[in-house]
Image (tube, rainbow, N blue to C red):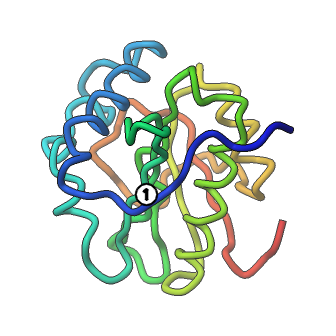
Amino acid sequence: MSEMQYKIREIEPRDNKEVESVIRACLIEFGGNHEGTAWADPDLCRFSEIYNSEGNKYWVAVDETERVVGGTGIGALNKKGFCELQKMYCLPIARGTGIAHELMKIALEYAKKYYTHCYLETLENMTRAQRFYEKYGFVRVKIPVIETEHFACEVRYVKSLNEDV
């Protein structure tokens, strides 16, 4: 694998608009630009504010010009011991570079400090993403662990954070 061309850092206020653009571009690509997905999340443009408390964090992957090409977050859920892997998206240019793996490793290491389980929701047609999650020990579950505003996300996964992959 060639040298990674991206770096990962915690989100900063200057990244908010770019993160929103990355998420919206990916949702359009997979037909998720509608209610019941991250598309309708009123906080998309303020992640640096939302993910700044203990147990909640968002990371961005940036290129050499500091342009955001991807990101992911860990957010608390209203269920004891559970967090959610949130808003994990990478632009097509960053896919296949290994940056998503680095984002996932950072997010899961962080989550282990605060939680026992990690939950996520995704769209049925995001099959590559599903295979990616399964590589990290996420197990598909039939019913939601908790009701979220993402009612259009018909695929759900849970991972025990006490296991290594």
Q: Residue 148 placed where, x, y %?
A: 32, 51
Give the class, few, some or many, for how many residues have Cα within 10 Å of label 1's Cα (few <14, many ≥20): many
Foreground of the two, 73 or 99:
99
Foreground of the two, 37 or 59:
59
Image quadrant where residue 159 sits: bottom right
Q: Quadrant of the C terminus?
A: bottom right
Q: Quadrant of the N terminus?
A: top right
Q: Residue at x 20, y 37 (%)?
A: 17
As drawn, which residue projects farthest toward the front?
65
Relative placement, left or right, of 141 versus 79 is right
Q: Residue at x 28, y 28 (%)?
A: 21
Q: Which residue is mark 1?
A: 59
Above or below, 112 against 118 in this view is below
Relative placement, left or right, of 43 versus 93 is left
Q: Residue 7 placed where, x, y %?
A: 54, 51
Image quadrant where residue 98 sits: top right
Above or below, 152 against 164 in this view is above
Q: Residue 29 placed where, x, y %?
A: 46, 13
Above or below, 86 against 126 in this view is below
Relative placement, left or right, of 91 versus 14 is right
> Which three-letter amino acid code belongs to the residue tagged 1?
Trp
Above or below, 66 against 46 in this view is above
Q: Secondary structure at mark 1?
A: strand
Q: Residue 65 placed where, x, y %?
A: 40, 37
Q: Residue at x 40, y 75 (%)?
A: 79
Image quadrant where residue 54 sits: bottom left
The number of callouts visible is 1
